[in-house]
Image (tube, helix red, strand yellow):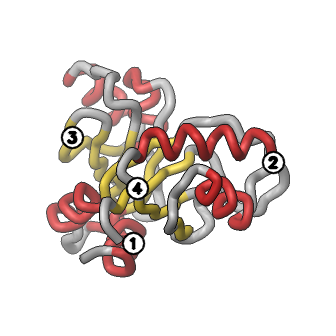
């Protein structure tokens, strides 16, 4: 697939009550002009091809509004970016790391971010515009979204590095 991107739907569990199904998502991506759109797991992660990913996602949200009550944030990142994150963070403690995404225009001060992460038993170990990799203090915790939202990201969504590694293995080059 050329121009491969991944759409991360916030607070979407495919097929649960009042949530879009996998069929809803596939139909919405098809209506939006994405020739290829594949779900990865059932957590609202869709891999798709397209030249203008933001326009595709806008059209997907419009199509979903007709079918479902879903109305939340969708963030898109190139698969190549996710491959870089996995390369840097897939070490022995990868099970404690997660990528947290938020709108790229949000600016979070270092001291505020460190304070909120510490309060939520995690630490930011890598970051850039619209993303941060969080290392959780304990196994089976996912503190990236609440930490980043409390620090000022308002709305964020996270996926564990092991989940991203599986996605990259399945769809990567």
First in sequence: mark 1 or mark 2?
A: 2
Residue annotated with mark 2: 67
Residue annotated with mark 4: 50
SS under mark 1: helix
| Residue 168 point in image, percent of width and height | 32, 72
Q: From the viewer's side, name the closer residue of 50 and 133.
A: 50
The residue that appears at 44% across and 49% down in the rendered structure is: 158
- Quarter of the image for residue 161 reads bottom left
Mark linked to residue 113: none
Q: Nearer the viewer, mark 1 or mark 3?
A: 1
Characterize the local packing of mark 4: few (<14), some (14-19) or many (20 or more) Cα atoms within 10 angstroms: some
Mark linked to residue 127: 3
| Residue 99 point in image, percent of width and height | 34, 51
- Quarter of the image for residue 33 reads bottom right
SS under mark 2: helix
Residue annotated with mark 1: 167
The residue that appears at 20% across and 24% down in the rendered structure is: 110
On-image quarter of the N terminus: bottom left
């Amino acid at each position: 697939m050329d121009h491969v991107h991944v759409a991360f739907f916030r607070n979407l569990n495919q097929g649960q009550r009042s949530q879009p199904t996998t069929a809803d998502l596939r139909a919405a991506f098809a209506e939006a002009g994405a020739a290829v759109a594949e779900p990865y797991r059932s957590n609202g992660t869709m891999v798709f091809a397209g030249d203008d990913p933001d326009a595709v996602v806008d059209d997907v949200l419009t199509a979903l509004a007709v079918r479902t009550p879903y109305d939340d944030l969708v963030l898109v990142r190139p698969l190549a970016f996710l491959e870089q994150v996995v390369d840097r963070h897939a070490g022995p403690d990868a099970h404690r790391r997660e990528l947290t995404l938020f709108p790229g225009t949000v600016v979070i001060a270092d001291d505020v971010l460190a304070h909120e992460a510490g309060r939520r038993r995690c630490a930011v170990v890598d970051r850039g515009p619209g993303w941060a990799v969080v290392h959780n203090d304990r196994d089976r915790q996912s503190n990236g979204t609440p930490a980043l939202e409390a620090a000022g990201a308002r709305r964020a969504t996270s996926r564990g590095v092991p989940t991203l590694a599986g996605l990259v293995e399945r769809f990567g080059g």
